[in-house]
């Protein structure tokens, strides 16, 4: 029997030599590209303006002072449930 070595589908390598500015530039480009692709999906499915959809998401999350105070409470609840498995 011969043993075949399986190569990973995606290989990730930590680059210690990359500059901080270049690393943040790559992250920024990734976020912009993801918003563009998501916008294309939004247009294809709903035929709506992606910017209005994104603004609706932001407005729903932090549209009023009450929501701004509710979000940290909800996030901390989810974090507690995730760490303790008490909410299952």
Image (tube, rainbow, N blue to C red):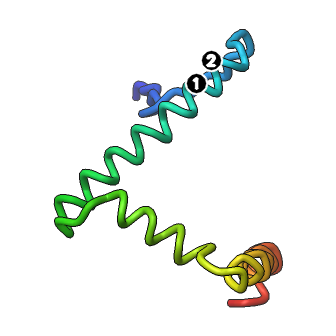
- Residue 6: percent from the left, percent from the top? 44, 30
Question: In the rendering, which numbered label is found on residue 22?
Answer: 2
Q: Quadrant of residue 66?
A: bottom right
Which x, y percent locates residue 46? 20, 69
Question: Do residues under tags 2 and 1 come within 8 Å of each other at their CB atoms?
Answer: yes
6 sits to left or right of 52: right
Q: Measure how far apart labels 2 and 1 are at the Cα level.
A: 5 Å
User: Circle 1 sits in a helix, a strand or a loop, which is it?
Assistant: helix
Identify the image quadrant of residue 63: bottom right
Q: Nearer the viewer, residue 41 or 64?
A: 64
Whether 74 is drawn above or below 33: the answer is below
Task: Estimate the x, y position of residue 62 in percent, counting from the top left.
Answer: 63, 73
Q: Is residue 9 left or right of residue 58?
A: left
Q: Which mark is residue 25?
A: 1
Left or right: 59 with respect to 14? left
Location of the C terminus (image quadrant): bottom right
Which residue is at 72% across, 76% downward? 68
Q: Quadrant of residue 71?
A: bottom right
Q: Quadrant of the N terminus?
A: top left
């Amino acid at each position: 029997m011969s043993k075949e070595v399986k190569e990973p589908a995606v290989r990730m390598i930590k680059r210690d030599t990359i500059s901080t500015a270049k690393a943040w530039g790559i992250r920024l480009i990734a976020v912009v590209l993801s918003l563009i692709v998501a916008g294309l999906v939004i247009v294809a499915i709903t035929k709506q303006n992606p910017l209005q959809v994104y603004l609706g998401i932001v407005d729903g999350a932090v549209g009023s002072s009450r929501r701004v105070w509710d979000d940290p409470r909800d996030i901390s609840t989810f974090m507690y449930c995730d760490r303790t498995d008490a909410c299952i």
